[in-house]
Image: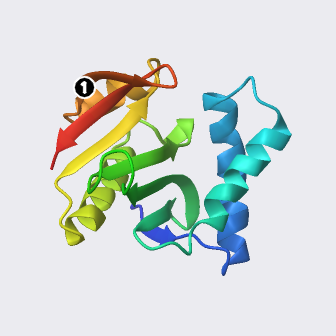
Amino acid sequence: MEISVDYIRISRQNSNHCEEFLNLGYAYMKEVAPDKSLEIHNKFLNSILNRQNETERWLVGIKVNAHMIGFAHFKVDRSERVGWGYIMEFYIIPDFRKKGLGRMLYEFIKEEFMKFGIENLWLTANQENGEPYWFSLGFVDTGETENGMKILHILI
């Protein structure tokens, strides 16, 4: 079976994309912050949507055969690591993991950053799912932590 992969920019201007993002976002939040309330999850996800009018910030969904199966939220860092690319959120639903789709989304992110001349990327990763995945893509441990997670880096 042939698959069709598309990347879509998510913003408040498209309510269908927002609804798809929020549905995936709740599953993501249950995975990364299971101890937080639905109200906190909702505030966090809506804060992401509300900031999509900012320049040098993206919320991109990955669709497979017209169904959103993941998303990434990333920006050009202008505060902590000035001029670096910062991947803030990255999610692929469990049924679509280990099929190369996360790597495809990551390649899309790199291409977007390279348009802005970005050469360094950073992110934080949880130990269970995040670290093994990002290490497999070439990220390295900086030796620093943020919110109890390792800060990882790669030169693209």
Left or right: 137 as drawn, with respect to 156: right
Q: Quadrant of residue 105?
A: bottom left
Residue placed at 49% from the left, 55% from the top?
73
Q: Nearer the viewer, residue 53 or 130?
A: 53
Q: Which residue is mark 1?
A: 142
The quadrant the N terminus occupies is bottom left
Q: Residue furthest bottom?
A: 13
Left or right: 88 as drawn, with respect to 110: right
Left or right: 99 as drawn, with respect to 9: left
Does residue 147 lie above or below 78 as drawn? above
Residue placed at 40% from the left, 48% from the top?
87
Whole-percent x, y for residue 66 in the image: 55, 68
Q: Residues within 10 Å of mark 1 (few under 14, many from 20)?
A: few
- Check the image and tell me how it is coloured: rainbow
Q: Amino acid at mark 1?
A: Thr
Residue placed at 47% from the left, 18% from the top?
128
Whole-percent x, y for residue 7 in the image: 44, 67
For label 1, the SS is strand
Q: Nearer the viewer, residue 109 or 102?
A: 109
Whole-percent x, y for residue 86 in the image: 37, 49
Left or right: 122 as drawn, with respect to 12: left
Does residue 117 lie above or below 129 as drawn? below
